[in-house]
Each structure stands twice: as C-alpha cells, then as structure tokens.
C-alpha cells in the first residue's frame, strides 16, 4: 500500500461505501477498530445527515475512516422515457399502496455542500463515485490533508483521475455489487463491463498512483490474488453486508445466501443506472424496459422499495450484491476483518512455499 494508506490501517482491507443505509457509523467503526479502513456512504443523504454520521463515527472510534460522495450527474435523461416507465410501474404502486416518487428531485446529491463540510472539518479519506472531481477540488482536499480516491471502471477513467490529481484510484470490476461507477453512463455499453483482474492489469499499466481493487472479493485468498496482481489494497462490500453492524435490511441480508436467489444481474430497473443485484421479480419484469435515467428512476422507485421492505417482500426490493454473494459469512465486522487477514497471510505463505527458490 502507499505510505499514506499504510499509516492509516493495519490491513490492506477497505470496507466499501454502500449507499442506502448499509455503510453507517457502526460498521465503519467496527472495521476501523479491527485494522481495516471503514467507510461512510454519504450518497442519498443530506449534507447535515452526512455530518451527523461523521460525528457519530468519531464518538465510536479514533480509527481511520473515509467518506464517499456521489458526483453530480448531467441532465441526460429523456423525460418522456421516464414518464413511460412511470406508467409501467403503476401496477407496482397499486400493489404496494404507495405513490411513485418525483423524478425531478435534486440530481447533485448535495455535492457542493458536502464538499464544503469535508474541507472545513477534514476526514482522513474521501472517495468519489460516478465521476471525477475537478483538479481544484482535489487540490483543496490535498491541502486539507485528506487522501482522495476516485472510483474507476476503465483504464481511461483511471488516467483522467490521475491527471486531475487523485491520490488513489479504486478499480471496480464488473463483478461488483451495487452501482457500476462509470464516469459516463452510456446505455450502449450495458453488459460490457470488464472483469476485475483484467481491468486491474490494464490500469496498472496506465497509471502510477496506488490502486484499490474492488469487485466480487469475499475471501482472503482473493485479496492475496489482487495484491499479487498489482493492487495496493482490496475493497469488499457484499462481504460486510451480512455483518450485524451493517445497516442493510434483514431481508437483504438473508437473500444473499438464500437458494431462492441463484444469480445476480446488472440492471437499471431500480435507479436508471447499471447496478448489480440479486435477480428477483422486479428486475425480471421491469429491468428490460428501464430507461437510462439516473437519478430520476431512483427517485421514482424509492417509495416502492421502502414499501416492499415494509411488507416483507424481497421480490420488490433492490437486493444489491456482488457475484460472490453466496460466500457471505455472518460474522461481526471485526471478526471478519481478522479472518480475512488470516486467510490473506495463509494464501501468501502457500504462494511463497510454491514459488521457485
């Protein structure tokens, strides 16, 4: 790992920032206390809500942590396509007895206000999803002593992040659960993502800054593999979803290892942006027709998702999950960090014994 990140945590293990409630202060604190890098997800929260969670986290631990921000999205959605999708979801609204949301809610996720707070009261690490900040913004974080990470899905995006002044890139393979962090949402590229190991090799040959690898990682041996392939650290999300400290809904946690859910798929059904989740009724019925309209579709379906969860109906929820979801282990986050670290060392030792001398 880079010296800055090495100084922050004992193990090269990063807990992914999972928006929607999973990555809160309790989970980030438990990971930090165990020697990993915990993350708060500020996406979908107000600036004040983000700051309150930061204060809660600081009361729980003096360990390292990061905060993840969503980049503002350009207004590219076709309003007529969104309206057609709203009509298609009318039956869902009737079934769950809840109105559809307003697609014209804010598209910038309070980005500027969140940046201002994080510059005024700095945290150790800030990462960015769905794009790359300007050089001025990244330089401002550098002056504040904050390590910046930009999530990328291609070598080109990694190079742009390096040019803009990012300290690190998080390379997200197509195996990753939740949203694909492409910097430009192009529906013509749907289902064309690159696997983590191939993408990691491409990025390592393109940039000189440190790299965090993310996408389907669930075991210490996989962490060893991406470190051997050139990553400086590994980021895991789905592995932490089932931890008791995770804020994920109980139905979501149970679904990860439920034989009823046999596979994951990239879908626009819930948010209008490609995201990997367990295939359920909602994805099967609406995924093929969902428009490229983020965050409009996210706001349209938000009430439906809450109503489905309240009704105990996992078939109507966004069950984000990476491809390794069936390998999830229901352990406290601190114990999971220690187990992953032990598996990592065992894998390294095994590799060393097999290596020619």
Image (spheres, rainbow, N blue to C red):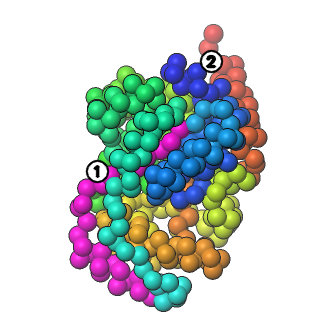
State left or right for residue 151 relative to residue 278: left
User: Which one is nearer the viewer's eye here, 257 or 291?
Assistant: 291
Judged left or right of residue 303, residue 242 is: right
- Residue tagged 1: 184
Q: Is residue 229 magenta?
A: no
Q: Residue furthest top?
A: 357
Is 223 in front, or is 109?
109
As measured in the structure, the alpha-carbon distance from the residue carrying label 2 to the one carrying label 1 is 42 Å
Return the residue at label 2: 355
Q: Quadrant of the C terminus?
A: top right
Q: Quadrant of residue 171?
A: top left
Viewer can see residue 315: no
Q: Residue at x 25, y 56 (%)?
A: 74
Question: Is residue 88 a member of the stretch shown in magenta?
Answer: yes
Magenta part of the chain: 66-91
Q: Residue at x 52, y 54 (%)?
A: 49
Q: How many numbered marks appear? A: 2
* Residue 218 x/y as whole percent: 63, 44
Check disc 1: other Cα within 10 Å, few if <14, some if 14-19, many if 20+.
few
Which residue lies at the image location 35% right of the left edge and 67% below the top edge?
A: 105
Query: Residue 335: x and y, percent?
Result: 76, 41
In the figure, 126 relative to 229: above or below? below
Q: Residue at x 58, y 21 (%)?
A: 7
Q: Secondary structure at mark 1?
A: loop
């Amino acid at each position: 790992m880079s010296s800055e990140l090495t100084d922050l945590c004992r193990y090269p293990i990063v807990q992914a920032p999972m928006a929607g409630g999973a990555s809160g202060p309790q989970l980030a604190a438990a990971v930090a206390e165990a020697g990993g890098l915990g993350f708060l997800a500020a996406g979908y929260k107000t600036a004040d809500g983000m700051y309150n969670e930061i204060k809660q986290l600081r009361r729980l631990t003096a360990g390292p942590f990061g905060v993840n921000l969503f980049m503002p999205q350009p207004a590219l959605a076709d309003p007529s396509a969104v309206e057609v999708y709203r009509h298609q979801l009318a039956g869902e609204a009737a079934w769950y007895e809840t109105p559809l949301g307003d697609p014209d809610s804010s598209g910038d996720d309070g980005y500027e206000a969140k940046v201002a707070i994080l510059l005024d009261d700095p945290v150790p690490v800030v990462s960015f999803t769905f794009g790359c900040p300007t050089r001025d913004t990244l330089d401002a974080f550098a002056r504040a002593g904050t390590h910046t990470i930009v999530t990328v899905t291609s070598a080109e995006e990694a190079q742009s992040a390096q040019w803009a002044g990012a300290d690190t890139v998080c390379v997200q393979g197509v195996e990753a659960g939740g949203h694909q962090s492409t910097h430009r949402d192009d529906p013509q590229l749907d289902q064309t993502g690159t696997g983590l190991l191939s993408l990691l090799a491409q990025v390592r040959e393109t940039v000189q800054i440190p790299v965090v690898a993310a996408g389907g990682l669930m075991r210490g041996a996989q962490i060893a593999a991406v470190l051997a392939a050139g990553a400086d650290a590994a980021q895991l999300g789905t592995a932490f979803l089932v931890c008791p400290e995770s804020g994920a809904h109980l139905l979501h946690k149970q679904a990860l290892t439920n034989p009823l859910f046999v596979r994951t798929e990239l879908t626009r059904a819930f948010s209008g942006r490609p995201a990997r989740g367990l295939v359920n009724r909602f994805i099967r019925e609406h995924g093929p027709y969902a428009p490229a309209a983020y965050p409009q579709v996210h706001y349209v379906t938000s009430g439906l998702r809450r109503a489905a969860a309240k009704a105990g109906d996992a078939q109507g929820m966004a069950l984000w999950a990476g491809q390794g979801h069936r390998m999830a282990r229901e352990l406290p986050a601190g114990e999971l960090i220690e187990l992953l670290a032990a598996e990592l060392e065992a894998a390294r030792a095994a590799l060393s014994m097999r290596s020619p001398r």
